[in-house]
Image: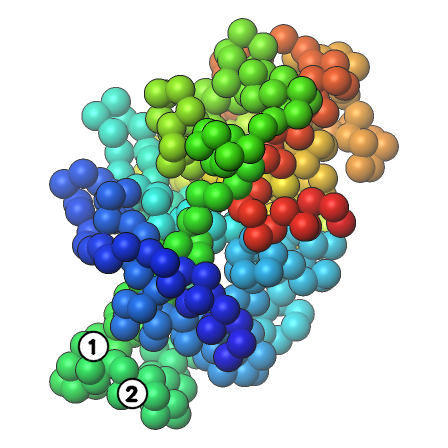
Amino acid sequence: MYKIVSVLVLASSLIACSSSVSDSTKVAAKQSDLPVMASNPKAQLGAGLFFDTSLSKHRNQSCASCHDIASGFADGREQAKRLGVSVGSDGISTGGRNAPTASYAALTPIFHQTSAGVYRGGQFWDGRASTLADQAAGPFLNPVEMQLSSVHELVTRIQENTQYVNQINELYGETVWLDESAVYAAVTDAIAHFEMTESFMPFDSKYDRMLRGEATFTPQEELGKTLFFSQQFTNCNSCHQLNKSPFYARETFTNYEYRNIGVPANERLNVPIDEGLFANPLVNDASERGKFKVPTLRNVAVTGPYMHNGVFQDLRTVVEFYDHFNNPKRQINPETGESWGSAEIPENIDLATLEAAPALNDQRIDALVAFMKTLTDQRYEHLLQQ
């Protein structure tokens, strides 16, 4: 209960706004409509559901287990950090994908294909959940996550809580109980509303404060910013910049597209090759194999491990991995002392982007890491010292 109250207090200063979905503009909710107020009744119901461990098979895992508010809405548990992926309700089962941060996820466009044929948006690494509510529906019944056996079992667990029943009756109508799928939709809609509150997207990092004239970058951070936004020196912003206007105030540091960047397998996991975007039921083009959604860099410094499979532990390693495409001096993974390893799916690696940058020296890599640390929400800045 303490965590729930803390989250709602953090978001109490929000302005009133709508949370409607707009298919016409292909966004889960317009940026101008977000965030929703923490006092929004659906958000309050969603907060309770988000932290409720009773909604998992062994009553020991909640949405917040893999998206911990204290860990930048990523999985901060030691086992997950060590393996690179989250562990299910049974304490044994694992999938093959790293739980991404839920920070700023509400700003992700719905899954769609652009007029140029490029896939964009959606939740999960392969975009198979179009909206936040779609995403919230996944973990409850996933056999390696929360592991409930059916929608009926979830509804039964919901009905154990009189407060939930009363809230759902008030918000969605008493007739919702006539259809278990409607109850499930109400649950996921409420969780989505909670994820639309300011707690998930405060835009108060040092970078944001710098834009508002409230903070000043160190020379190293300033160098990193220059490198990041300049395609003369790096190619970072080819994928990790949403709005090409200089220093957009609500920049999420992702274009929400999909790329195969040649990530090697995570040898700590015993899983088959991950098809990435090609595993999305809406995608039937084999040229999309091995592509994964470009993640936000918001809170990236405190939400490791990294890549879709959690193969890298340290943010600096990630930058070195990118640099190895252009730098013959970066052919050894500093975490293993061995070569980087082969890409899981080598046929369509985006070499046109990856190789379009000069080699980086250690000073510039350190500067890029320093800049990315400035993207950390203010309440997580203490984690940068750990």
Q: Position of 307 compared to 146: left or right? A: right
Q: Amino acid at mark 2?
A: Val
Local SS, label 2: helix
Residue behind mark 2: 165
Give the residue at the far right of this rendering: 337
Local SS, label 1: helix
Q: Which dot marks residue 171?
A: 1
Residue 4 lies, with reference to residue 274, above or below; the image says below
The residues tagged by marks 1 and 2 sit, at their Cα atoms, a distance apart of 10 Å
Quarter of the image for residue 219 reads top right
| Residue 340 seen in the figure | yes
**Residue 240 screen position, x and y as percent:** 47, 28
**Residue 221 screen position, x and y as percent:** 64, 25
Q: Residue at x 53, y 56 (%)?
A: 73
Q: Report the coloring of the rendering.
A: rainbow
**Residue nearest the viewer, comparing 293 with 232:** 232
Looking at the image, tell me whether mark 1 or mark 2 is earlier in sequence order: 2
Residue 319 lies, with reference to residue 133, above or below; the image says above
Q: Amino acid at mark 1?
A: Leu
**Residue nearest the viewer, comparing 230 with 277:** 230
Q: Residue at x 35, y 50 (%)?
A: 106
**Residue 332 screen position, x and y as percent:** 80, 25
Q: Residue at x 67, y 62 (%)?
A: 77
**Residue nearest the viewer, comparing 224 with 95:** 224
Q: Residue at x 71, y 61 (%)?
A: 79
**Residue 162 screen position, x and y as percent:** 34, 92
Mark 1: few/some/many CA within 10 Å (<14, 14-19, 20+): some
